[in-house]
Image (spheres, grey):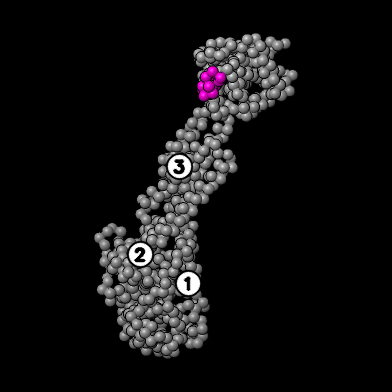
Amino acid sequence: MSFNHLNPLRLLNKAIIRTVNKLQSSIFTIPILIVILVFSLQIIGLFQLLELKFLDKLFQLRTSEGLEPRIVMVTFDDRDIAKVGKWPFPDDVVAKLIAKVKAGNPRVIGLDVYRNLPVEPGFEELKQIFQSTPNLIVAEKFVSPSVLPPPYIDYKKQVGFVDTVVDQDGTVRRGLLSIEKPNGEIIYSFSTKISLNYLVLENIRPQISSDKDNTVILGKSRFAPLDSYQTGYGAADNGGYQILLNYRCQTECFQEVSMTNVLDGKYPQNLFENRIVLIGSTAESLRDFFFSPYGQIPGVHIHANLISQIINGAINNRPFLQTYPKWIEGIWVIVWAAIGVSGISGFLRGNNLGKSQFITGILTFLLIATLGLVLISYISFLFSFWLPIFPTLFSFLLSSLISIIQLGEKFRYASNIDELTQIANRRYFDRFLMKNFQTKQDLSVIICDVDHFKLYNDSYGHQSGDTCLQQVAQAINKSVRSGELAGRYGGEEFAVILPHTDYESALTVAERIVTNVRNLNIPHKSSKTSNFVSLSCGVATMTAEDSSSLDLLIKADRALYQAKEQGRNRVVGYSNQQ
């Protein structure tokens, strides 16, 4: 009959080896599985809101780019409306305002106010000023409920839609440049029309690249529309030609003058010279406000930021806010998942770390890595590349968590193993014995001692002594059967727990142990018993008189003492002492 079945500690040893091997191999397997999970979650939009909020924080942390010299805004608030005394403004007031601005020789005028219906007095006057000002761009609302532009102006040259695209939290982070009508006609936004009109005098016109991604080349800039699963977004509404808005600032980078001051002539003489002049509302009562990364700002400021982005990109090569290709993001996620796995697996080599040191080390590693990821994302943003953080952070933390769980299992197993001999340590041995003692079923214990081991150390040295103990431990471990446990009891002492084993069977196991150790043929020139390393064993079996597992150990220890007294290299059972 073979007795090389796996006992609990041999199972334990194999489990440790499997755990370590899994953790090491997971440096390759876990990241790949995680990136599949991450992209699946990203597609359904799980990270989208968090990512967009983090993008807002990046805008807020970035310093303002200073005053935009090409744009001036003529705004009206509730005080201006009260002074006029009527809303909508009468046509003659609007006509006078545009005439004042036009007299300042601006390059383009943008009227971010709906004028679809006559508001007397002054309709004919307004109509005449609209038709005689070809560089005037008037707003329309295209998406239902639509607000049509004045019917008496050139639609293709003088009208742009002011519809905006908002994210799920109501924030405007994307600019809508154009829309394709059901009949295939392309119409341009208010911001796009103004920008293109301004750039014509710079001899800059848009060119469509031959690339399949509808890339547009505009002067020194090159940009492509967002796709439906753009980095940072899940399944975003990508209708029309959309780009990411690269805000300059909140509001302070655009020069403003009130409508009242313009009508009263209270503004610098050359304020509008060769500039874009936007006319729009900042009145709270009109509620023409949108959420931006900086909070609520007037709609005219949204248009100003998009116009500034387009013309500065074309003229000064100010970068558009770009995203990385999906394959690069995939590699990035894999890299950080691997960092999580490899970083935690590094603690496998920290066998001398205490519990508090281990926990502190893990937390420090996670904190430094997370801050590093945030810093990298911020630096990337400063170069106008949006690098999403949450898919990457999720992959890093998830891989770290998986590795920590695996590492914890390794430590849990290792806490039950004697480091030198790789069999059960005293703590695990005591727990195993107590558990089996409480069943009140047949239970036997063997305590073994290496004969004259001190003399062995003196003769061969402690390093050889350690090797000897390792060999003896494995010989004992191989001598027991499945469900039985061999452990290091202390120093050169070993012990075996034999559940469901009577006295005679226990003696048989002990004899086998002594024989197997003797057959190792480990030389022992200083032994007073044999020329080879040998064992003395004491055997005891639980009886009704035993009140605790300690009683059983005491009996086995007494039997071991008798074995030594009788000349060593032998087995003695406690029942023989009766």
Residue 18 part of the magenta-drawn span: no
- Residue 142: tell me if it is visible: no
Occupied quadrant, residue 445: top right
Callout 2 secondary element: loop
Residue type of the residue flagged with mark 3: Ser
Task: Please provide percent x and percent y for residue 72.
Answer: 40, 78
Looking at the rendered structure, the number of numbered marks drawn on it comes to 3
Residue 464 part of the magenta-drawn span: yes
Task: Please provide percent x and percent y for residue 19.
Answer: 49, 34
Q: Which residues are magenta?
A: 457-470
Which residue position is annotated with label 3?
A: 342
Callout 3 secondary element: helix
The residue shown at (66%, 11%) is 565
Which residue position is annotated with label 2?
A: 319
The residue shown at (33%, 73%) is 195
Magenta stretch prevailing secondary structure: helix
Which residue position is annotated with label 1?
A: 297
How far apart marks 1 and 3 lie (CA) works out to: 46 Å
How far apart marks 2 and 1 lie (CA) works out to: 23 Å
Nearer the N terminus, badge 2 or badge 3? 2
Nearer the N terminus, badge 2 or badge 1? 1
Q: Nearer the viewer, residue 567 or 68?
A: 567
Task: Please provide percent x and percent y for residue 446.
Answer: 63, 18
